Image (spheres, rainbow, N blue to C red):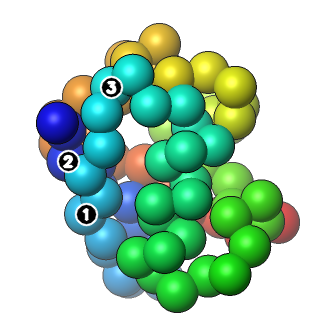
Amino acid sequence: MIEVVVNDRVGKKVSVKALEDDLVSDFKKILALQIGTINAAKITLKKGNATLKDHISLGDYEIHDGTNLELYYS
């Protein structure tokens, strides 16, 4: 189990627990529940300059415990 910190660029940070084997789409659903957003499909996550694609696992993006991600709404 890893804990990923998600920053929404407005100053709000949320810690989300997930598994490295989870797909980005699954992670976005968990995140949407925690922040109160109804539609997880409208969430875009970025690590550095890379936009995370839904069908790839967190581990494949080298997202580990304590990794920071940026949250955008599309």
User: Which residue does the numbered mark 1 point to in the structure image?
Assistant: 15
Estimate the x, y position of residue 54 in percent, counting from the top left: 69, 35
Q: Quadrant of the N terminus?
A: top left
User: Looking at the picture, which amino acid does disc 3 mark?
Assistant: Glu
- What is the quadrant of residue 34 in the picture? bottom left
Q: Is residue 9 visible?
A: no
In terms of depth relative to the viewer, which is nearer, 13 or 26?
Answer: 26
Q: Earlier in the sequence, mark 1 or mark 3?
A: 1
The vertical placement of 49 against 73, above or below, is: above
31 vs 43, left or right, is left
User: Looking at the picture, which amino acid does disc 2 mark?
Assistant: Glu
Are discs 1 and 2 less than 8 Å apart at CB?
Answer: yes
Estimate the x, y position of residue 61 in percent, counting from the top left: 47, 20
User: Which residue does the numbered mark 2 point to in the structure image?
Assistant: 3
| Structural crowding at the residue carrying mark 3, measured as other residues with C-alpha within 10 Å and reported as few (<14), some (14–19) or many (≥20) | many
Residue drawn at x 50%, y 37% as measured from the top left = 47
